[in-house]
Image: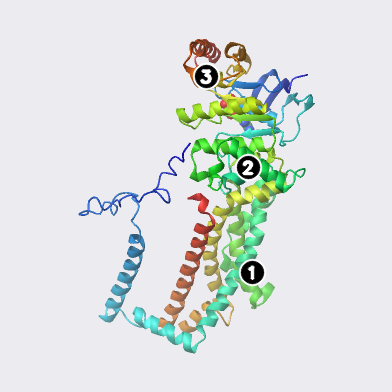
Amino acid sequence: MAVEGRAIDGPAAGAPAAPDAGSRRPSAAPWLFRLRAPLPRYVGPAFAVGTSFAILGLWEFTARLGLTTPMFFPAPSAIFLAMVRMFAEQHLLWHAWISTLRVWEAFLLAAVMAVPIGMLMSGYRAVGAALEPAVDFIRYLPVPALVPLSIIWFGVGEETKIFLLWLGTFFQLVLLVADDMRRVPQEYVEIAYTVGANQGQVLKDVAFRAMLPGLVDNLRITLGWCWTYLIIAEIVAADSGLGFVIWAARRYMKTPEVMAGVVLIGFIGLATDQLLRLIHRRAFRYLA
Amino acid sequence: MGPHLQFDHVTKRFGEVQVVETPFDLAIARHEFVVFLGPSGCGKTTLMRMVGGLDLPTTGEIRLDGAPVGKPDHRRGMVFQSYSSFPWLTVAQNVAFGLRYRSDLTEQEKAVRAERYLDLVGLYEFSDHYPNQVSGGMRQRIAIARTLAAGSDVLLMDEPFGALDALRREQLQTELRRIQRRDAKTIVFVTHDVEEALFLADRVVVFSKRPTRIVAEIDVKSRLGEERTLEMRDGEDFFALRREAIGTVRAAAGGEL
Ligand SMILES: Nc1ncnc2c1ncn2[C@@H]1O[C@H](COP(=O)(O)OP(=O)(O)O)[C@@H](O)[C@H]1O
Ligand SMILES: [Mg+2]
């Protein structure tokens, strides 16, 4: 018996290379405007990079023409120069490092707590019933509203920042994890039982493994939210970190510096996201 | 020797829903291949899950070798229609999963055994593939090999070939029957395909729609013998039996199959 069709999409690795969708009709690019058509390799990245530069170019051009006030909306080149200057003179790298550290500390703390609790909440109805009202209640509290309370409890040190970030992510994550766990097919659990696994083994070897791809995706998304709360925390109570840098620059109306800080956060987010996506693709090849 | 598996006055209710109302009795001999055939919703899956220990009868008892069945264990293996193997394990690891929680075997013994069953179902050369990289038919073989490796002597199969195309079904049916003879397994197999039921079974148990009861038993073994081959499917005997069976099933379903 031979391996029949790997899947619907694309030839199997090692199969003779099929002609490109586009190469048969070189005059048109049918993949470009056909609904849900896959793009040939490198075309996607080319579009991504091309469009990004086009937007930057347009922005620079508009600013140079004097159509915007530099005070409010500086050109990309001005922002870039500001960023270079901040790296050189204002320890921008150190501030970025501090912020990144805070995000990961709080995020890992939230994840390490949310994964087991979320799994138990959907695995055992009683745990779910007990915790769901509290989790749902806290989840809807806007984090900024809790800043004063947090400062009363923890002062203005690191603890406040970690607490606020944790607060913003843990309660969301718990419910996402519980959902992931709910989606684990009952068949997987039952297969494990019928080969003699106990409940702990089912949770660890089957449920956790089955939900892992979804979990990693949810962690990636939640990590993004962490940055939002971080900036709030750093604006309110900090003398370091990117939120502090942005807020300090605002006081003197140094718009290029404010935007440089914002752009740097964007870059860090983009890089982290791409890295986690790469890890996802590598670790979960079996999904292909 | 008493029956291998026995349903004794079994009923089942889920909350308000009385799934098996009439007390259900059935004795299944050791090494017998029994097929449950009946309209959907009549409780075939429920009965099978109770044998596996995944559900409890509301009243009555199911006995394995004379003793009431308890929690699920490796003696009763399940093969489901879908999600029958783990996508994150390779074919070989999936088969070996059947032995993972056995503490009475050494790792060496487990490996040898897993390999043997991998070979038996013709998947040896796909050992390192992931389930998503092989056909639906092969995924069902993985599940069969896993339960065999686990050492189950009762195989519970719930429409395992339901999602496969006709050719692959025939091939797997022939193989399953061969394995059952060779390894002397007791099999309870659920299907709603009459031809599949007759080809595989020693005995076909035909269910009515709810309230569920057994409306007929077809003794296929005395009509067709124990050996089943592809050629038989085109033979007179099989054809005649099939026609009879379809009549029985139609009557049982009351025009609702
Ligand atoms: N866990 C459950 N809770 C409530 N009703 C159920 C449950 N499992 C099965 N049923 C009901 O029992 C009936 C029989 O189901 P099932 O055993 O799956 O039938 P079959 O396998 O013969 O199609 C169906 O009407 C189904 O809705
Ligand atoms: Mg069913």
Comparing labels 1 and 3, the label whose residue is closer to the camera: 3
The residue that appears at 63% across and 16% down in the rendered structure is: B213
Q: Secondary structure at mark 2?
A: helix
Which amino acid type corresponds to the residue marked 1 in the rendered image?
A: Phe
Within-10-Å neighbours for mark 1: few <14, some 14–19, many 20+ = some
Which amino acid type corresponds to the residue marked 2 in the rendered image?
A: Glu
Comparing labels 1 and 2, the label whose residue is closer to the camera: 2
How far apart marks 1 and 2 lie (CA) works out to 52 Å
Q: Write down the residue under mark 3.
A: B194
Q: Quadrant of ligand 2?
A: top right
How far apart marks 1 and 3 lie (CA) works out to 64 Å
Q: Secondary structure at mark 3?
A: helix
Using the image as rendered, state which of residue B231 and residue A214 is in the foreground: B231
Within-10-Å neighbours for mark 3: few <14, some 14–19, many 20+ = some
**Pointer 3 indicates a residue of which chain?**
B
- Image check: B190 left or right of A83? right
Above-or-below relation of A37 to B41: below
The residue that appears at 48% across and 72% down in the rendered structure is: A268
Q: Write down the residue under mark 1.
A: A163
Tag 3 and tag 2, C-beta contact below 8 Å: no
**Pointer 1 indicates a residue of which chain?**
A
Q: Write down the residue under mark 2.
A: B115
Using the image as rendered, state which of residue A13 and residue B227 is in the foreground: B227
Q: Position of residue A41 (x, y in %)?
A: 35, 58
Examine the image and state in which quarter residue A99 appears.
Answer: bottom right
